[in-house]
Image: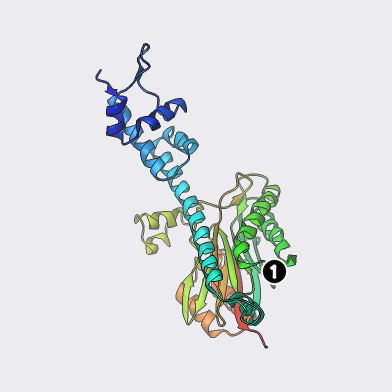
Amino acid sequence: MDMLTIGAFAKASRLSPKALRLYDELDLLRPARVDPHTGYRYYAPEQLERARLVAWLRRLGMPLAGIRAVCALPPAAAAREVRAHWERVEAETAERRDLARFLVDHLTTPSGPSSPSRRDTAMTTLDLRYAALTDPGLVRPANQDTAYAGARLLAVADGYGPAGGPASAAVVEALKVLEDGAETPAGEVLNLLADTVRDATAAVRDAAGSDEAGTTLTAMLWTGSRLALVHIGDSRAYLLRDGGLFRITHDHTVVQSMIDEGRLTPEEAATHPRRALLLKSLTGGAPVPADLRLHDARPGDRCLLCSDGLSAVVPEARIRHVLTTTAAPEDAVRALVDAANAAGGPDNVSCVVADVTQSAA
């Protein structure tokens, strides 16, 4: 059998000889033969495919331990692992991007006794008006949703499985500690949210008991000038601004991943048999990374957090109409729940509406 020297193999695989020696030591890519006298490494041509996969995964930034796991999997399972890795990278990149934006804003805004920073000014002039409502719908025998709205925290959690109700209640209850804490600077709030959700995962694990039960989580923490968002699952957050309705979360579902890959249209996804299958949620199993975002708030903004009991049956055009024509948050959440039930109420439905208002001086 023809063998490639380490130099020839490095050139063909686009891996350096130094990298190949490291991967040999780590049992990631063993040479086909090692000369017993010189110690020189030789590789078989059929090893090129694995070597190229290793090279691609390294360029993707995957750790060596992850590469070893991916290389041991069949193609379909390996593809799922690569997708999951990239979702984590995107979430971490988005968190760093939002922090960078905050730092640029913070460092370029004049501050001082006679010229308060924009953040400090906003903190003294903006308030939230809010309301929350949850309803079992017309079909389900029990309500496994939890909705909460407070002076700092807004949250919707949609439980599923045998202990879905306790799981959703547990994660929201764990987040309520944020209501009692000191107001957090915008630059630190994403870290605070990430730490709190990590602690809340233990509460969900205790409530769920196994990975057969779990919950989604979509929550916002008010800093006085910004809203920090944490999101896992297929509950949603929307922003109504200047008459336009914008979805600011990305569903962690099988059908959404198929839409992202171009294999499914949004219209096809609405009737897909696996449309409710989650890729990420809080369960009794291993923790999963959450999406974290930081959003500037403006007077007149209206935020909606909802479970899929609303978004799956009420078109966004109808949601926008309700939000733009209903003045008080209390009336808005009731109108949205009524709209879901008018559409058949096939699932529990939960809504939180919060308005950003100008404080009286």
Quadrant that contains the N terminus: top left
Left or right position of 68 against 34: right
Against 291, residue 101 (above or below) is: below
Q: Nearer the viewer, residue 329 or 3?
A: 3
Quadrant that contains the C terminus: bottom right
Residue depicted at 42% across the width and 39% down the height = 78
- Locate residue 80, reporting x and y percent: 44, 44
**In the rendered image, is residue 4 in sight?**
yes
Against 293, residue 354 (above or below) is: below
Q: Residue furthest right?
A: 180
- Locate residue 222, reporting x and y percent: 63, 70
The residue carrying mark 1 is: 183
Left or right position of 81 against 194: left
Residue depicted at 37% across the width and 23% down the height = 31
Residue 27 placement: quadrant: top left
Question: Dot 1: few (<14), some (14–19), or many (≥20) neighbours within 10 Å?
Answer: some
Residue 292 placement: quadrant: bottom right
Residue depicted at 60% across the width and 70% down the height = 351
Indicate the amino acid at tag 1: Glu
Against 167, residue 16 (above or below) is: above
Element under label 1? loop
